[in-house]
Image: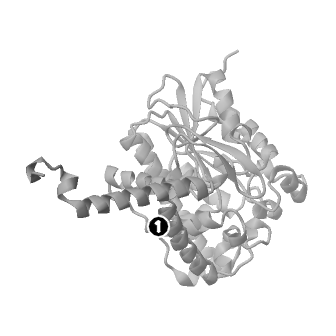
Amino acid sequence: MDKQKQNFFERHPGITLFLFVLFLIVCIDFISGWLLIKPSYQDFRTEHYFYHHGLRPNQKSFGRWSFEIYPFCTSSLGFRDSLPRKVPKKSNLHRILILGDSHSEGVDVSFRNSFAGILASKAPGYSAEVLNASAVSYSPKIYWLKLKYLLEKEKLHVDEVFILIDISDIQNELVYERFNPVRFNDLMNGWIHFKNFLKRNSFLFHSLSAIHQESGKKRFYSMIHFPGTETGGKRISETMSADLYYSLFTHFDDNVLLANPRFHGVGDWLYEPDFHELAIKGIRLGQDNILKIKQLCDRYHIQLTISIHPWQSQIRKRQAFDEYSALWKDFAFRNHIRFVNIYPLFINEENPEIVINKYYIRDDNHFNEFGHELVARFLEPLVFANCRKHE
């Protein structure tokens, strides 16, 4: 046959064979992935090049934190929501953005039973809209980066920002201190989406990623031996939050601190002389980042509110106005930031153990459904203070 009449594949049999075998391997790989890759209760989470980590958009899945399996949905913005839905960048409603960590994300409860979900359901009665941009292990550094990304990159319209701070931010701020993205990068964002796609669909990529992560996780947990105070005496590596805790330290390389069991009991730092200085450093880092948020809010004419809420260890100390709350209250006053102290809601005349059993997940620092309901009732008049309730 005349070579000129031959097509590309006929003229290059070696390349043809290679492409055919490659196509076959890819097909087998993806079919194997479809059959063998088991869904994870953390599949809705993702790394992010600019604000470290967040939630994948338009998800309808299930999460698990301790022992409960709970529904987990996200909107088009990658915010936890009642269902996957398209959220417009601009709105005629008074839009309030909540930024917090796992307490505000609402681990172990459905969105409608979380305080953010309850407030979101009440928002239409105030001609308002509540969006929850919270995620586990967030702290002021990540709040600033995420808010900057939402306002400057996504062009999201927001009228108010309500930030919820707790004592875990002390450690998180130290961990994120060296995480400093330079600029918005669509290529990096695309690469992360592509990696996530391969992890969920390619059996080969999924397996290699799992081996790499498991190796890093084993090294990490072999270095730190401690009874996780926030998990009721269980090692964190024995809980569903193990992968999340490990991923928190990807930009932290102080092995001396990591190997110190007390470093992982952040709830006690302020009360231990050896860790008090480190605790103050974490608080100062957080306050510096809140000032960056304040500047960002002032530039976009957004009202800023910060609040603090207690862990179980703080409730047991029965100090509704301790050093931590005093430092944040004074900081807010000096910088003209609206401040809300949620401590007295849980620290009062009632027995601390009764309060903890009533409002917190068992052996965990997070609110249960009753705790979320209590916080929602308390915050409703404060969150919607600039809105008019429909009669």
- Compare residues 2 and 62 and report the one nearer the observer: 2
Name, please, the residue furthest toward the top: 391
In the displayed structure image, the side of residue 222 where residue 310 appears, left or right:
right
Element on which disc 1 rests: loop
- Which residue is rendered at x = 50% and y = 58% of the image? 199
Residue 178 in percent (x, y) is at 43, 68
Q: Which residue is mark 1?
A: 177
Q: Is residue 249 above or below residue 21?
A: below
In the displayed structure image, the side of residue 26 where residue 254 appears, left or right:
right
Q: Is residue 71 above or below residue 363?
A: above
Residue 388 in percent (x, y) is at 62, 21
Residue 119 in percent (x, y) is at 67, 34
- Colouring of the image: one colour
Q: Is residue 341 above or below residue 22?
A: above
Identify which amino acid the numbered label 1 is placed on.
Glu
In the displayed structure image, the side of residue 163 where residue 151 appears, left or right:
left
- Compare residues 338 and 100 and report the one nearer the observer: 100
For the image, the number of numbered tags is 1
Q: Can you tell which quarter of the image residue 131 is in? A: top right
Residue 156 in percent (x, y) is at 43, 36
Q: Is residue 47 visible?
A: no
Q: Is residue 112 visible?
A: yes
Q: Can you tell which quarter of the image residue 337 is in? A: top right
- Which residue is rendered at x = 51% and y = 31% of the image? 86
Picture quarter with the C terminus: top right
- Crowd rating for badge 1 (residues with CA inside 10 Å; few <14, some 14–19, many 20+): some
